[in-house]
Amino acid sequence: MSDALLPAEFADLEPFAERWSLATEAARYATRVNSPMAEMEAFYAAAYPRVAEAMTYLDGFPLADLPDQQLNLLYLTYSLIMVSLPVEVWHQPRVIDSGTAYFDRYLEPTP
């Protein structure tokens, strides 16, 4: 029995899975704003080149009933989206000039 969080096809992303395969947007956001840029940049550099392949791979499974490893891969992709603007544009974890502004989502999208 494997302890891997991700499918074997994405074993190279396993070092990021425990920190970034998060089930809720709130958890992904909290991780983003509490992560150093170097960590987000390393995650982005590893995951971004694989995102198209991950989406193609996940298309082979029913979205409403993803097995755990595939669901973790989807969550990892969601986290990649969450860190893309800080890495590509802002060069900091928070939105530039946003002060303490935030908003809470009360309903989580599935999956």
Image (cartoon, rainbow, N blue to C red):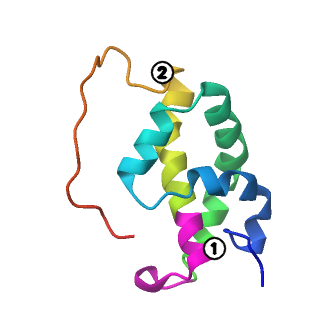
- Cβ–Cβ below 8 Å for labels 1 and 2? no
Q: Is residue 85 above or below residue 81?
A: above
Q: Which residue has dot 1 on it?
A: 57
Q: Which residue has dot 2 on it?
A: 90
Q: Residue at x 45, y 47 (%)?
A: 28
Q: Is residue 36 left or right of residue 85?
A: right
Magenta part, dominant SS: helix
Q: Position of residue 54 (x, y in %)?
A: 63, 65
Amino acid at dot 1 = Tyr
Residue 66 is a magenta residue: yes
| Callout 1 secondary element | helix
Q: Is residue 14 left or right of residue 95?
A: right
Q: Is residue 70 above or below residue 32?
A: below
Amino acid at dot 2 = Trp
**Badge number at residue 72:** none
Of the 4 image quadrants, the one containing the C terminus is bottom left
Circle 2 crowding by C-alpha within 10 Å: few under 14, some 14–19, many from 20:
few
Q: Earlier in the sequence, mark 1 or mark 2?
A: 1
Of the 4 image quadrants, the one containing the N terminus is bottom right
- The CA distance from mark 1 to mark 2 is 30 Å
Q: Position of residue 45 (x, y in %)?
A: 70, 39
| Callout 2 secondary element | helix
Q: Is residue 42 above or below residue 52?
A: above
Q: Quadrant of residue 99?
A: top left
* Residue located farthest toward the top when viewing the structure as drawn: 97
Q: Residue at x 53, y 65 (%)?
A: 74
Q: Position of residue 96 (x, y in %)?
A: 38, 17
Magenta stretch in the rendered image: 61-74
Q: Position of residue 48 (x, y in %)?
A: 64, 47
